Each structure stands twice: as structure tokens, then as C-alpha cells.
Image (cartoon, rainbow, N blue to C red):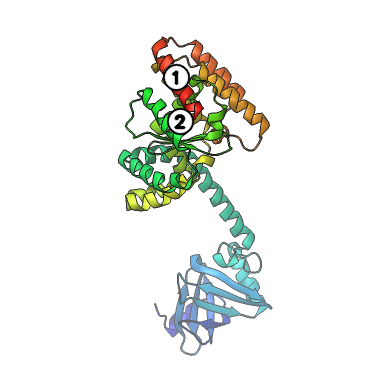
Amino acid sequence: MERSTSEFSQFQNPIYKAKFFQGIQPKGREVHFEIQDGYIFISDPEKAQELSEWDPYLIKKHSYENQVLILKWGVRDPFEYLEIKEQNVIQILDTSYPEKKLLGGGGFSWESFTFLRIGIWIMALGMALMLVYFIMMPWIVRIGSNLVPIEWEKKWADQTEKSYIQSQEIDSLATIQMNRFYRALEHQSKYDIRIFVVNDSLVNAFAMPGGILVVNSAMLDKIKEYGQLVGLLGHELAHVEKRHSLQSILKSVGGVVILQFLVGGFDLFSGILFEQFRNLDQMAYSRTLEAEADQEAVEFCLRQGIHPDGIIGLFKILKEEESKHSVDVPSFLRTHPLTEDRIEQTSQLIENKRFRISDQRQNELENLFCELKEQ
């Protein structure tokens, strides 16, 4: 919009001088400007022609240094600028636009934000995202684990056996006898359960997705009777059947991997997760998952016609090891309740159960256990 000379002569508002910059790589030119209802009208003093009209919403302070005020206006580059040197005019502008804080602070503009303010916003945003993440993560993990096909877990188990298991020192004879013991339990599973006895001094046992169970030789040495071994297998099998191992891995690598699985399919998902399998022996389960595995171990024993007090004996072994080695405790003790609490909770659970003991089954398993221990 341009104004004629006659129109300019009708204005009663004071006219001020400034240097005006407009366009890409502009050269400053001397201009006149006036303020009317918050708008700044900029004109060419020689031609009495309006050059620009600034609405107050886009007016910002670019800088105020060495008693020179530079105003900035526009939505995007190229911006327009006014350079004002007269102090009385600068004071008038500061009074006309108090919310802009032209002589101090800087108003609400990105240019005037200090690093401290930006840091506070970033911290607040980070905390909000973390809160959402931890609230949503259990739900994401459950949904993600249910979306993973069992066939994929079986493929991972095959890969695990070829790489991780073969890199360990396997006690072959004990492994054969351990699997004979497991088959005698006649456990029905949708997975191809494979148990390996690994020569390792750490009293530990753990399960991998897809049906692979690892029992360290130190753990096997500590087990004194077949009921304890049945309880141990029942506990680890629960982690497999309930997909606890997979959930723990998903939780450790984050929900982003689940999203990649939804987009990229088996190969991408498998490549990321398989690296986590190598560290599964050091991975801790949540208290909820561990308590569920303890309950399933009791049910497992009852289905075999075996008294589940072997689980109590197993916990006592772990408690003894826990007292000896405050660091080298089994991975499945690291995040659950104290072993003493687990003994008490499992004892109460057993008391509330009705079960029948099969002498024939007990004799069969005891004989197989003795053969295993003699290896």
C-alpha cells in the first residue's frame, strides 16, 4: 500500500529518522518512520512514498549495543531492519512497545533467549519424555513381545545355538543327561526346548528366547536332589513359555526396536536383538516376571506329581551363594524380592495347594538325577 504526499501531510504523528534495510544483501537508506496505533509506517523522505508497513506483532529487537537500536520485522528471510541512533527516539520506541523490552531483556523472541532458558526448556522436555517413556514402556514391551511370531524365536534359538552356545565350554555328557532328565518330565511346549550345561564357576542358570536353557556347572554342583532341579527347570521354562526373556531384551534395547520390527521385519529386528542374547546371562528380570516364574515353578512340580519343596531348597542354595558373593549372584536374583521373602511366599503358596505325589515319577527322576550327578 502506497501513500500520496497529501496523505502524509495529513498525519499528526511525529516523524522520526532511521536507516532502513530491506531485501537480500540490502544497503541501508535514510528513511522516515512514524508510529500509529502500534504500526510503524516507513517512507522515503524524498519521494514521500511509503516503503513498508510494520504490524506490531512481528516487530522484534534485533540488538541494542553502543546506544544503537536495531529493530527487526518479518516472518522469514529476508527480514527488514530499522537502525535508530537518536536516544530520544529510542526512548519513545521503548515506551511505545513495553512488552518488547527493547532496552533490556529482549522480549519473547528466539534471539533474546539465553542459554539458561533454552537449557531449562530442554531439561523440562527431556523429563517429560522420560516420564512418558517409562509409563509407556511396559505396555510397549508387552505388545511388542506378543507381536513377535514364535517361529522367529525358534530361528533365534537356532542362531544362538550356532554362535553363542558353541562358543562356550559345554559339558557334553552332563548336557545329554540333563536333556534326558527334562524329557522324562514330559513337558509339553510350543518350543523345541534344548538345555546346555556350561562349565562356569558362577552359580547361575538362565533362559533364552526360543527355548534354550543354560545351566552352569557350578549351579548343577550345588543342587543336591532331583526336586531342586525340577524346580529350577520349572522356573526357567516359565521364563521361556511366558516370553519373559524376550520382554527383558525388548525393554533393554528400547521401544524403538519394536517400531523398527513393525517397519523392517525379521532381518532388522533379529540383527539388533541377537546381539542382546549374548548378554542375557547378565540380564535381570523384573520383580513381577520373577514372581510369576516362581509361581509357575510350583505349578510345574505339582503337574509332575513331585512335592514342590525342592524349590525352597533351591532358594536356600541361592541365599547361601548370595551371602558369599555379594556381586556374583545369579542374574535372576538381581531385581526380585529378597531370597528370604521368596522362601516365605513360595512356602505359603505350597501350603495352599492340593497335590498328589507320584512315587513312580519320583523314583524315575531320582534315578536320572543320580546318573546326571555321576557324570
Distance from disc 1 to disc 2, alpha carbons, whole Å, reads: 22 Å
Whether tag 1 and tag 2 are in contact, CB under 8 A, the answer is no
**Is 321 drawn above or below residue 281 in the view shown?**
above
Residue farthest right in this picture:
66
Q: Which residue is mark 1?
A: 367
Residue farthest bottom in this picture:
46
Work out whether residue 49 or residue 321 is closer to the camera in this orientation and state it.
321
In the image, what residue occupies the spot 42% across and 51% down? Answer: 272
| Pointer 1 or 2: first along the chain | 2
The image shows residue 107 at horizontal and vertical percentages of: 59, 63
In this view of the protein, can residue 262 be seen by the observer? Answer: yes
In the image, what residue occupies the spot 42% across and 21% down? Answer: 300
Q: Look at label 2 and name its amino acid.
A: Glu
The image shows residue 53 at horizontal and vertical percentages of: 46, 74
The N terminus lies in which quarter of the figure?
bottom left
The image shows residue 136 at horizontal and vertical percentages of: 46, 40
Task: Give the structural element (helix, strand or loop) at label 1.
Answer: helix
> Residue 180: which numbered mark, if any?
none
In this view of the protein, can residue 292 be seen by the observer? Answer: no
The image shows residue 68 at horizontal and vertical percentages of: 64, 78
In the image, what residue occupies the spot 33% across and 26% down? Answer: 188
Q: Which quarter of the figure has residue 3?
A: bottom left
Q: Which residue is mark 2?
A: 236
Task: Give the structural element (helix, strand or loop) at label 2.
Answer: helix
**Is 172 drawn above or below residue 49 in the view shown?**
above
Query: Badge 2, how many Cα within 10 Å: few under 14, some, many 20+?
Result: many
Work out whether residue 23 or residue 332 is closer to the camera in this orientation and state it.
332
| Total tally of numbered discs in the picture | 2
In the image, what residue occupies the spot 49% across and 39% down? Answer: 135
Of the two numbered discs 1 and 2 in the rendering, the one whose residue sits closer to the viewer: 1
Q: Look at label 1 and name its amino acid.
A: Asn
